[in-house]
Amino acid sequence: MKPLIIAGKEFNSRLFTGTGKFSSNKIMGEAILASCSELVTVALKRVSIGDDTDDMLRHLQHPNLNLLPNTSGVRNAKEAIFAAQLAREALGTNWIKLEIHPDPKYLLADGEETLAATRALAKEGFIVLPYIQADPVLCKKLEDAGAAAVMPLGSPIGSNQGLQTREFLRIIIEQSNVPVVVDAGLGAPSHAAEAMEMGADAVLINTAIAIANDPVRMAVAFKMAVEAGRMAFEAKLAEKSIGAHASSPLTSFLS
Amino acid sequence: MFSDELENIPWEETTKTIYAKTAADVERAIQKSKNQLSVDDFMALISPAAEPYLEQMAQLGRDYTQMRFGKTISMYVPLYLTNSCMNSCVYCGFQHSNPIKRIILTEEEIMNELEAIKEIGPFQNLLLVTGENPREAGVDYLDKAIRLAKPMFNNLSIEVMPLSAEEYSQLTEAGLFGVVCFQETYNKARYNVYHPRGMKSKFDWRVNGFDRMGQAGVHKVGMGVLIGLEDWRTDVSMLAYHLRYMQKNYWKTKYSVNFPRMRPSENGHFQPNVIMTDKEYVQLMLAFRMFDHDVDISVSTRENKEFRNNIIPLGVTSMSAGSKTDPGGYATYPQALEQFAVSDERTPQTVEDDIRKNGYEVVWKDWDGCLQNDFAQNQLNPPLL
């Protein structure tokens, strides 16, 4: 499997994971290690910034794990920029998952504010990974604004509904010059495999692992699904044939 | 304003609708509950017809809660700043005519209380509570209290008298995150039986307070009814209407619902008109979760320890612990009169241990004060936008 490269950094795993909703930080740590994920997103609002003994961060200390702080909770670009600066200082990384959702119910991203914040943060040297609706035009604009990858949703966060935005993801993947990470709504390993088969560069999974009866085994299941999906993509899937082969060919007169 | 909407939701008819719900209505609501339900569906789920479906509702309620909140319970603690109050709510220990010692904590006392709270648990969510005495413990007093608490607590809420939109904005600028306010009852015709005098007797001012919170951009609004006054099923249906109204009009705000229930012997001078059983309480909590997968459901120490342990997988998402419901109760005046009797007297550490035993993680911190706009704006230098 080809490694994934985002902003010059190589990842052997194409499964990114989240850290919320687990029944304990211990189980979270174990599940993430079992997933072999190399990039985990952490909500800035959940951790005690500047506190080395923070229980969640303590369980994420592993040489293969890179932290991707997120700005969940902010409502506009200004708040997001400030949060990103704080995250850089507190967690020592210039990577930021930009989440601007002024709607606290469905947590849907504000494209306009996300674009403004991406532009400002990229200029400041941040590696910006914006979480957004599966909006192909917005993805191109974010690419121009300096996003290191785009993270369109498969369906609303935490909904486990899979690739409801399938047709738009297809266009995004086709058009993108930066990696496409399908984020949010993937509820089963089969959803993750489907995204990878379509050519997504990576997926981000949180709820489906966190609330499984056995999060560690579910993490492994997602790992395998992501690998299988990617391998199938690289091996070039055969297209489904449309209809039966005609018995009276229409083009025989040409030969 | 919601008072206008309420005119079109007659109390008596709503009550009739609820009690006329059938098993078929309940089954339909259950079937649909993966998506957002209407208030009419909610009525079926809280109706007597839904009682036989409690286990099915519990399974769904647990799943919906876990999808949105995971296996976690958020913790908060109240700090009563004053028991001084101009109102005469017939069920409340702080009512004006009650001859108790009135206390308004000074700045120094507030600091002592804040430090004492930090000693009992790693709280980050603090709820500041007052009676209604705008002259001596009004907005400027709250402003000061918020500024004192802000360096120690990441998430600050108030449960005080309804304020104007400008006042809510002022407090938000001082660092306020949430506002909790209970309508107590939505039965306008009977509201003044319980709230005969003072500002609280003004039904519309109170019920429209939520619009003002929304207009001021308060991050989180806590709504609720007091169970024990009017028919609880009708009251919570009104609350459900109100929640949907707020979500549509003030969509950037997060909501929580609460339904504290009065117990018979709690208060010598007032006996509740309605007693809600544990089974009904659970039914209501599950119905709310099915009605809205994302609303925060809060359960205080009014409920006892056994009950609070048992309901952890059933929809609740935030709990208080170690609460003192009298001003100065943590450090200054440990013997003063409580507003209501605390039934769960476990320490925060014990509550945390018990939640963990249920397979849930306790979340002390889920907000950072520095993420709020007013703060961010002042810190951004030079401006990047």
Image (cartoon, coloured by chain):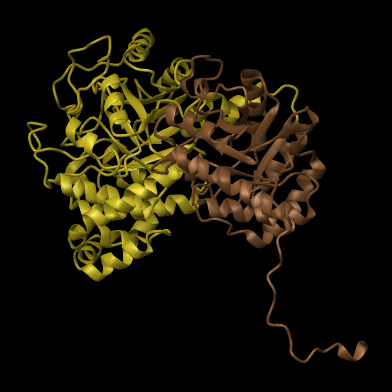
Chain colours: A brown, B yellow
The C terminus of chain B is located in which quarter?
top right
Q: Quadrant of residue A13?
A: top right
Please state the horizontal and vertical placement of residue B255, each as a whole percent of the image.
Answer: 42, 43
Image label count: 0
Q: Residue at x 33, y 24 (%)?
A: B77
The front one of B186 and B220 is B220
The front one of A87 and B175 is A87
The front one of B138 and A92 is A92
* Apparent side of residue A239 relative to residue B266 in the rendered image (left or right): right
Please state the horizontal and vertical placement of residue A143, each as a whole percent of the image.
Answer: 79, 44
* Apparent side of residue B19 relative to residue B176 in the rendered image (left or right): left
Q: Residue at x 58, y 51 (%)?
A: A192
- Position of A72 relative to B115 (above/below): below
Q: Residue at x 44, y 45 (%)?
A: B68
Please state the horizontal and vertical placement of residue B271, each as a whole percent of the image.
Answer: 8, 39
Residue B258 visible: yes
Residue B134 visible: no
Please state the horizontal and vertical placement of residue B359, each as a whole percent of the image.
Answer: 33, 34
Q: Residue at x 62, y 33 (%)?
A: A39
Q: Quadrant of residue A96?
A: top right
Q: Residue furthest right?
A: A255
* Apparent side of residue A18 relative to residue B4 in the rendered image (left or right): right
- Position of B3 relative to A51 (above/below): below
* Apparent side of residue B378 relative to residue B355 in the rendered image (left or right): right
